Image (cartoon, grey):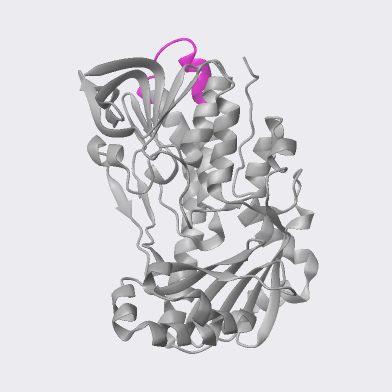
C-alpha cells in the first residue's frame, strides 16, 4: 500500500476543503486535499457566493481576478406571495467591498481556488481520491485510508480535517455524535430557459401551498421547487403531466416554458434536505468543518458561505500551531468555540422559518397572508439592509488574519 505523509490532510474538495487547504498552504503548512471526483462538475450545487466570501477573496488579493469569471450579480431579494410582489432585501448597503451576491457555478469557484492553490509549493490536490477510513493510533487520529487511481493508500498526517460534506464518511467513522434538528421539506432542482426581457433577479414565489425559487443564471433559470419531506415518489407516481401543471401554476412569466424544458423526471434532481450539527466537532487529531460539522438548510443559500467561514477560522487558529507541531484537542476545540455560535444562530433561524412558514404553507395548499415583517421591509427600503446583512454577511464574519508565507 502506498503511504504518503503530510502535515494536514483534508478530505473533500468542496468550498470548505479547498479554501481551508489554500489558506493553510498560504500560511506555510504542508497540506494535501483529497477530492473523490475527477473534476468539480456537479449540477445544482450551492452556486451563491455571498458578500462575506467575496470579502475573503478581497483580503486574499484574489477578488479582481475572481470576478473576471462569468457570473451574475444579485443586489436585491424579492418574493411574490400570490399576486403581490415584495422587495425584502437590499445588499447595496452592506459594509463590505462587494455589495452583491455573485451567482457562479460552483465548479468555476472551486477550479479558481484550485488554480490559485497549486501555485503554492505546500499545496497538494489529489483528484479521484476518496478518504474511506480513519487511521487511529493510541486513541489519536493520525491520517486516513483512501482509494485513488492506483488503488488503496494511506496518508499519515498530524491533523486530519473532515470536509467531505453532509454525508461525511469520516464523520461516520469518527464516532462523533450528530444531533438531527429536522427538516420537513425536500427540494427539487430544475432548469428553465431565459428569454429576452426576463428580470435578472432572485425571485421567490408562494402560491396555493407551493413554494418556488428562481435564480437568474444569465442563460438559464436555476429553479427550486419545495415539496414535503419524502414526497418525490408520490409526485412521480402522479405522472409528469400533473407535475408540469403544478409548475405552470407557480412559475409566473416562465410558465409557458415548462413543457419544453421538462421532458421527463430525469431533468429533475432531488435534494434531500438535512439540518444537523455535531455535539463535538473534534477528537484528538481530527476536526470536522463545513457540512460535515453542520448540515445547513437551503434557506438563504448560506451553506457554502458558512463552510468558507469555517475554513477561514480553522486556518487563522490552527496555522500557527501546525507550523510548529501537532495541534492538541484543545486547539481543535477553539475552532468549534469560534464557529458554533454563528452556526447555531443561523440554523435556529432556518428551523424557525421552515417550521413556522414553509411546512404550514406546503400543508395548507393555499396562499398565505403576507407576514407583517415582509410588508414592513417592502414599505421601508432602509430596513432591507438588515435581512441582507444577516444572509449576506452572516453572524460574526471571519477575516484573513495570517500573512502569506
Does residue 303 belong to the magenta stretch?
Answer: no
Q: How many marks?
A: 0
Q: Establish if 12 lies above or below 30.
A: below
Please tell me which residue lies in front, 267 or 188.
267
Please tell me which residue lies in front, 328 or 76.
76
What main secondary structure does the magenta stretch of the protein show? helix
Q: Establish if 37 lies above or below 83.
A: above
**Percent from the top left, x then y, of residue 365?**
44, 88
Please report the residue visible at 48 percent of the width from the left and 54 percent of the height from the top: 45
**Percent from the top left, x then y, of residue 405?**
62, 14
Please report the residue visible at 49 percent of the width from the left and 12 percent of the height from the top: 323
Please report the residue visible at 55 percent of the width from the left and 38 percent of the height from the top: 111
Residue farthest top in this picture: 324
Please tell me which residue lies in front, 63 or 308.
63
In the rendered image, is residue 80 in sight?
Answer: yes
Q: Establish if 104 lies above or below 31.
A: below
* Direction from residue 327 to residue 78 in the image, left or right: right
**Percent from the top left, x then y, of residue 165?**
39, 45
The part of the chain drawn in magenta is 314-329
**Image quarter for residue 110?**
top right
Amino acid at each position: 500500500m502506498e503511504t504518503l505523509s503530510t502535515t494536514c490532510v483534508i478530505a473533500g474538495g468542496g468550498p470548505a476543503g479547498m479554501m481551508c487547504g489554500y489558506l493553510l498552504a498560504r500560511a506555510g503548512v504542508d497540506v494535501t486535499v483529497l477530492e473523490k471526483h475527477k473534476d468539480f462538475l456537479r449540477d445544482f450545487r450551492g452556486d451563491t457566493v455571498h458578500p462575506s466570501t467575496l470579502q475573503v477573496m478581497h483580503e486574499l488579493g484574489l477578488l479582481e481576478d475572481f470576478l473576471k469569471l462569468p457570473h451574475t450579480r444579485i443586489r436585491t431579494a424579492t418574493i411574490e406571495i400570490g399576486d403581490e410582489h415584495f422587495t425584502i432585501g437590499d445588499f447595496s448597503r452592506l459594509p463590505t467591498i462587494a455589495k452583491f451576491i455573485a451567482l457562479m457555478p460552483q465548479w468555476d469557484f472551486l477550479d479558481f481556488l484550485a488554480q490559485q492553490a497549486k501555485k503554492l509549493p505546500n499545496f497538494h490536490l489529489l483528484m479521484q481520491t476518496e478518504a474511506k477510513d480513519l487511521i487511529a493510533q493510541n486513541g489519536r487520529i493520525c491520517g486516513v485510508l483512501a482509494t485513488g487511481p492506483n488503488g488503496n493508500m494511506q496518508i499519515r498526517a498530524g491533523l486530519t480535517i473532515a470536509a467531505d460534506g453532509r454525508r461525511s464518511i469520516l464523520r461516520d467513522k469518527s464516532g462523533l455524535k450528530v444531533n438531527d434538528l429536522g427538516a420537513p421539506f425536500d427540494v427539487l432542482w430544475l432548469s428553465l430557459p431565459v428569454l429576452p426581457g426576463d428580470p435578472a433577479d432572485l425571485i421567490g414565489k408562494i402560491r396555493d401551498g407551493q413554494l418556488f425559487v428562481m435564480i437568474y443564471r444569465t442563460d438559464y433559470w436555476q429553479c427550486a421547487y419545495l415539496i414535503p419531506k419524502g414526497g418525490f415518489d408520490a409526485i412521480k407516481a402522479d405522472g409528469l403531466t400533473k407535475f408540469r401543471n403544478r409548475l405552470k401554476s407557480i412559475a409566473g412569466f416562465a410558465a409557458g416554458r415548462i413543457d419544453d424544458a421538462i421532458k421527463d423526471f430525469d431533468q429533475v434532481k432531488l435534494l434531500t434536505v438535512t439540518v444537523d450539527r455535531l455535539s463535538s466537532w473534534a477528537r484528538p487529531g481530527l476536526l470536522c468543518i463545513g457540512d460535515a460539522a453542520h448540515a445547513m438548510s437551503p434557506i438563504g443559500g448560506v451553506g457554502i458561505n458558512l463552510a468558507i467561514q469555517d475554513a477561514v477560522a480553522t486556518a487563522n487558529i490552527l496555522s500557527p500551531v501546525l507550523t510548529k507541531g501537532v495541534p492538541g484537542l484543545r486547539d481543535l476545540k477553539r475552532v468549534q468555540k469560534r464557529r458554533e455560535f454563528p452556526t447555531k444562530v443561523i440554523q435556529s433561524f432556518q428551523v424557525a422559518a421552515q417550521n413556522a412558514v414553509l411546512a404550514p404553507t406546503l400543508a395548507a395548499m393555499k396562499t398565505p397572508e403576507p407576514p407583517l415583517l415582509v410588508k414592513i421591509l417592502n414599505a421601508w427600503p432602509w430596513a432591507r439592509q438588515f435581512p441582507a446583512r444577516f444572509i449576506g454577511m452572516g453572524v460574526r464574519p471571519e477575516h484573513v488574519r495570517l500573512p502569506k508565507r
